[in-house]
Image (spheres, coloured by chain):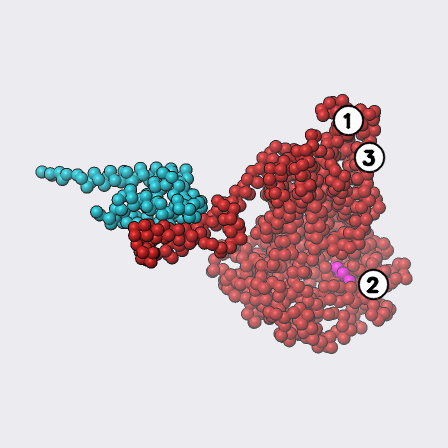
Amino acid sequence: MTAARNWRRLLRLPGVDEVDAELRFHLQAMVDANVAKGMAPGEALARARAEFGDAAAAAALCREIDRQLDRRRRIADTLGNIARDVRQAARALRRSPSYTITALSTLALGVAATTAAFTLVFALFLRPFPFPAPADLLDLNTKAPKWNLERVGLNYPDFHAWRASATTSFAGMALLSSSTFNLSDGTTAERVDGAYVTRDFPAVLGVPLLAGRTFSEEEDRPNGPSVVMISRSLWQGHFNGSASAIGRTLVVHGRTATIVGVLPDEGAFIERAKVYMPYAGDPAQVWQSYDGEAVARLRPGVTIEAARAELLHAHEPIWAARDTARFVTPTLTPLHEVVTAPFAGASRTLAVATALILLIAVANVTSVMLARAVVRQRETGIRKALGATAARVAQQVLAETLVLAALAGVIGTLVGHWSLQLLLRALPDQFPGWAHFGFSMPTALFATVLVALASVASGIAPIVFGRKADARAAIGEATPRTTLSRRQRRLLDGLVVFEVAMCVVLLAVGGVLVQGYTRLQGVDPGFRAERTLAFNLSLPAVTYDTPVATVSAWERLLADIRAIPGVAMAGAISCRPLGCHAGKFTDVEGRQGVAGEATPVTLTLSATAASFDALGVTLAHGRTFRDEEGQGGRPVSVVVSEGYARWAWPAVADPTGRRIRPAGSADSVGWWSVVGVARDVRHYGLDQEPRPTINVPWTLAPPRNMAVVVHASGETDPLVAPLRAAVTKLDPTLPVYQLTTLDAALTRSLGLVRTTAWLLAVFAFVALLLAIGGLYGVLSYTVSRQRRDIGIRMALGASRSAIQRAVVGHVVVLVSIGVALGVPAVLAAQRLGARFLSMQAAPSWGVLLVAALVVLVAGAGSAFAPARRAVRFEGRGVLAEE
Amino acid sequence: MAADIDVLQGTLDMLVLKTLTWRAMHGYDILDWLRRTTDHALRIEDAALYPALHRLEARGLVESEWGLSANNRKARFYTLTPAGRRALKAEAKVWQRYVDVVGKVMTAAQEDPA
C-alpha cells in the first residue's frame, strides 16, 4: 500500500481514479494485441472496446467494492490502534499494581460520590415531573408579609373568583387540601393519606384517569353526593384493579362514598395520596379558612409574568371587597421550585462537596501519573527515537488514563448507586413520592462524561512532560535523569497544596454542618420528648355529631388510657408539637395596632388541662386552665406563650390577668383571660423559631381531631398495645394514626439536617484520606527518586535526623501553604454560598482551627514513613550503584 | 472448438485464484493466461474480471500493488495472500468432489430392475 494511496484516502481527493487507470491499461493491452495481429489502429480500438464489455458498469462496481473495503480498513485501523493502546495500557497497569490500585480506588471514590450526588440532584431537580408539559405547572398561593407569612394558603372564594376570571393566561386551576381519611369496611379501620380536590384536579395536572371519571359539577358542590376517587394502589389493593370497582362504595369518615374514578399514582403529587374527595367549596362561604393550596396550568406560550399580572388583576375586586388593607397577595411560583425547595440547599451542598472530592481525586491521580511519566522519560525518549510521534505517545498516555478511568467509572458508578440506595433506605419518607432515584440514562451519560473528563484531566500533565523527553536525552545520557526537574517538582507540590486546601474546605464545611446539627440537638424543644408517646385520632362527624358526644368520647378514652399501668400522664391537644399548624389572629385588649405593623399569626391550640403535664410544657407565670373553663358560657381562661406575651405586652413582666379574643370578634363576644404564660415550644422543629402561641381549653369548641399525648412512667413500647386496645374499646372503626414517640418525631424532623451534616463529615474524611494518600504517594516517590542526593548528603556527613527533618519539613511547608489557602477559601465560599448552600453559619474559628490542625497532623504523619525510609539508604550502597 | 462455456461467478473466482498461484499478474495477464490454458474454451468477458478481482481483494484473498508491465506501462498487479491460498485449496477440493459425483451420475450404466 503506497503512501500516496494513504494520503488520498485521508484527504478523500478525487484525483486520478485507480479503477479507470486499471481498466484503461487492460484496454490498451487488448489494442496492442490487435495491432500486433495486423489490424489498423482504429479498428484495433473498436474491436477491443466491443470485446471488453460494459466498462462503465464494471468500473462503477469496482469503485463500490473499493469504497466498502476502504471504510472497513479505516475502521479496522482505528480499532486496531485503540486495541493496541488499551492492551499496552493494561499491561503497563498490571506491571505496577500498587500504583494501579491507588489510582483506581481514588478515581472510583470520586466517581462514586459524584454520581450518587448527581442521581439525587437529577431525580429531584432535573427530571421533569411525570406530568405533560410540566414547565407550565405553577403553584398558586398567597403571601402576607404583614403577618410574616410566605405561604398563607388559599381559601375557596378567592380561588373561585380567580378561576372564573383569569382565563386568558391559565388553562386551568385546581384547589386541593391534603388530609388523612378514616377508611373502613365496618370491621377494620385504616387511616390513609388523601386530599380534597376540585373536579379539575386531574385535568390540570394532566394525569389520565385509569378508570371512571372525575367529579361532576354537582358532586363538587357543598352537600353534594358522597363520591370518591381512589389511587391506583388502593384500586389494586382493595379491588384487584377490577373495572367493577367503579360504582362500588367505601366508608370514608364513617360515610358511605361511591367510587367514581381511579387516578394513577403519579397523581400522588400530594404525597402518597390514596383517596380524593370533592373539595365542595362554597364561593359564598363567610368564614374564610386559608387551608387550600392550588396548582395552575398555564396556556402554552404564556409567561409567568403575564399570568401573574392577570392573577393580580383578578384579585383586585377581592381586595376592594374583603381585604382593603391588602394583607394577602396571590403568588405564582413554578411548581417544581416549590416542591423541591426543602431539598435545594442540601442537594447543592452535596453536589459541590462531591465535585471537590472528584477534583481532589483527579489531582491525586495527576500527581501519581506525573511521577510515573518522569520515571518513564527514558522509555518515552526511546520510543520517540524509534519514530513515535508526540501525538502517538500522548495517545498511549491517554489510553492508560482512559483504561483507569473506565474501570474507575464502572466501579464508582456501581458503588455510588448502591450507597445512594442505602442512604435512601436509611431515610424513608424524606423525599417526595414522585422522585425516582433509580439508575437512568442521564446518570449513565453523566458518569461517562465524568470519566472521560477525569481521564483527560489526569492525563494532561504526563503528556505535557512526556513531550519534553527527547531521544537525545534518553540515549545520550549514561545514567538516565530520573529525578524531577524544578518545574516538575513545583507542579507536584502545587497539586499537593491544592488537595490540602480543598480538604480544609471540606473539613470546615463538614464541621460547620455537624456543629450546626449538634447545636440543634442541644436546643431546648420546650417540651419533654423522653418517654412520651403521641397518636392522632379523628372522630367521624357522622357518629360524634354533637359537642356533648365528642367531649364524652374523649373523656372516656382519656380515662381508660390513664388507667393503663405504666401511663404516668395523658392529655389531648389539637396539634401536637411537630405535628401540624393551626393559625388564627387575636385582638389584645387595650392594644392599639400600629399602622403597618406585622400582625403575627398565632398558633392556636385546643388543649386539655392535662396536656401541659403530659407534654412537659412548663409555665413561666400563673397556672394552667381547668378543662371546664371554656364550657357552657363560663368565662374563658387561656394560657399564652412567652413569645405571645412579648408581642402583646412588651412592657409587662407578668401578663396574667390581661385579656385577648379572636380577631374581628363582635363586641358582644367576651374576652379570654390569660391565666398563665407557658414557656416557648419549638412546635415546628428545633431549627424553626417558635410562633406566638395560645392554648385554649378544648371544651370551648371540642375538636373531633386531636393528638393524644401519653407520658410513660417507664418504657413506652409496652404501652402501644394497651393504647390501641383503649381506642378499639371506644370505637373499633377508629384507626390510630401517626403513632410515634416524641423523641422519634424530633429525630425525624432533623433528618435532612442530620443526613447532610454526616454526609459532609464522611466526605471531609474521604477528602482527608485522599489528600493524605496523595501526599504519601508523592513523598514516597520523591524520596525514592532522590536516593542519590540523599546518599551523597549522608556520605558527606548529614545526620539521619537532619535528612528526616528535611523531608518532614518539606511536607509541613506544603500542608501549611494548603491550609493558608484553604481557610480564606472557606470564608469566601461561606460568604458567596450562604444562601446557595445549606451552610447557614460562618465557620467558627474553632472549626477552622480543628480543620487546619487535623490536616497538619495528618500531613506530617504521612511524611514519617517515607522520611524513615529515606535514611535507610546506605550512602555507600547508593554511590556504588552508579 | 466449443468456445462457449459461460463461467459462473464462483468459478471465475476460483480460476483467478488458481492463476495467481503461479506469480503476481495484472488483469490482462490473468485473462490471457486463462484463455491460453483453456484453448479459448471459456467465455469470460473482460469487463467482468475486474469486479471479481476487487471483490477478492475486499475478501482479503488477493492483494494488489501498482507496478510496471512487460512493456513498461503502469499496471495493477495482484498477488495471492495466504488466506487466498487456503481458500483456493478448499474450493478446489469441493470442486473436485462435485466433478467426481456429477461424473459418476452421468457415466453410470442403467441397471436392469428385473
Please give the residue where the numbered disc 3 appears in the rendered image: A809
Marks 3, 1 in one chain: yes
Callout 3 secondary element: helix
Specify start and end residues of the magenta stretch as a single range: A601-606
User: How far is mark 3 from mark 2, CA to CA?
Assistant: 74 Å
Q: Is residue A858 magenta?
A: no
User: Mark 1 Cα within 10 Å, few/some/many (few <14, many 20+)?
Assistant: many
Residue B71 as seen in the image, left or right of residue A102: left
The tag earlier along the polypeptide, 1 or 2, is: 2
Chain B drawn colour: cyan
Please give the residue where the numbered disc 1 appears in the rendered image: A791
Which chain's residue wears label 2? A
User: Mark 2 Cα within 10 Å, few/some/many (few <14, many 20+)?
Assistant: many
Q: Which of marks 3 and 2 is in front?
A: 3
Chain A drawn colour: red
Callout 1 secondary element: helix
User: Mark 3 Cα within 10 Å, few/some/many (few <14, many 20+)?
Assistant: some
Most extreme residue toward the left, as rendered? B114
Residue placed most toward the observer, A751 or A222: A751
Q: Which of marks 3 and 1 is in front?
A: 1
Q: Is residue A602 magenta?
A: yes
Three-letter code for the amino acid on which mark 2 is drawn: Ser
Q: Which of marks 1 and 2 is in front?
A: 1
Please give the residue where the numbered disc 2 appears in the rendered image: A673
